[in-house]
Amino acid sequence: QVQLVESGGVLVQAGGSLRLSCAATGTIFGINRMGWYRQAPGKQRELVAAISRGGNTNYADSLKRRFTISRDSAKNTVYLQMNSLKPEDTGVYYCNAEKPFPTITYWGRGTQVTVSS
């Protein structure tokens, strides 16, 4: 099993910045892709950004100019740097990790990000 623990979610004013962290523990061998998803009230969970073990990244098109995902393999931690935050960025941010062959997906419990106007 893999445990994912997110941290860094707080209340922040619009225009501010925030960095989320997600630490993976447990049977972490074989994890390839790690990423961040978010879920706003009343909406479906959506991909924010993901990063492979090799460092390849992909982002939601609307977020790539403001958000940056990074990964510290030595610490088994993935980060999400969020800049120029907007009220519509409010939501619960979930960390995600995947092992391939067969695909196994793990989720963290989420961290709340609230952006006030």
Image (spheres, helix red, strand yellow):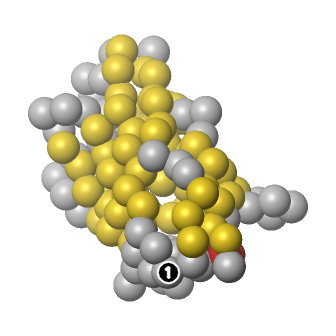
Q: Nearer the viewer, residue 114 or 69?
A: 114
Bin the neighbour count of mark 1 within 10 Å (Cα to Cα): few under 14, some 14-19, many 20 and up. Answer: some
> In the rendered view, would you say 52 is above or below 84?
above
Task: Identify the residue at image location x=68%, y=79%.
Answer: 117
Residue at the right extreme? 42
Q: Locate residue 53 relative to residue 87 in the image: left or right.
A: left
Task: Identify the residue at image location x=17%, y=39%.
Answer: 73
Q: Nearer the viewer, residue 84 or 71?
A: 84
Q: Locate residue 30 relative to residue 35 in the image: left or right.
A: left
Q: Locate residue 106 relative to residue 74 in the image: left or right.
A: right
Mark 1 sits on what residue?
15
The picture places residue 10, in percent across and down from the top left corner, at 55, 51
The picture places residue 85, in percent across and down from the top left corner, at 52, 75
Q: Amino acid at mark 1?
A: Gly
Task: Identify the residue at image location x=42%, y=61%.
Answer: 18
Q: Quadrant of residue 88?
A: bottom right
Q: Is residue 59 visible?
A: no
> In the rendered view, would you say 62 is above or below 36?
below
Q: Locate residue 74 relative to residue 106 in the image: left or right.
A: left
Q: On the rendered image, what quadrant is the N terminus found in?
A: top left
- Please state the total of marks drawn on the protein image: 1
> In the rendered view, would you say 35 is above or below 108?
below
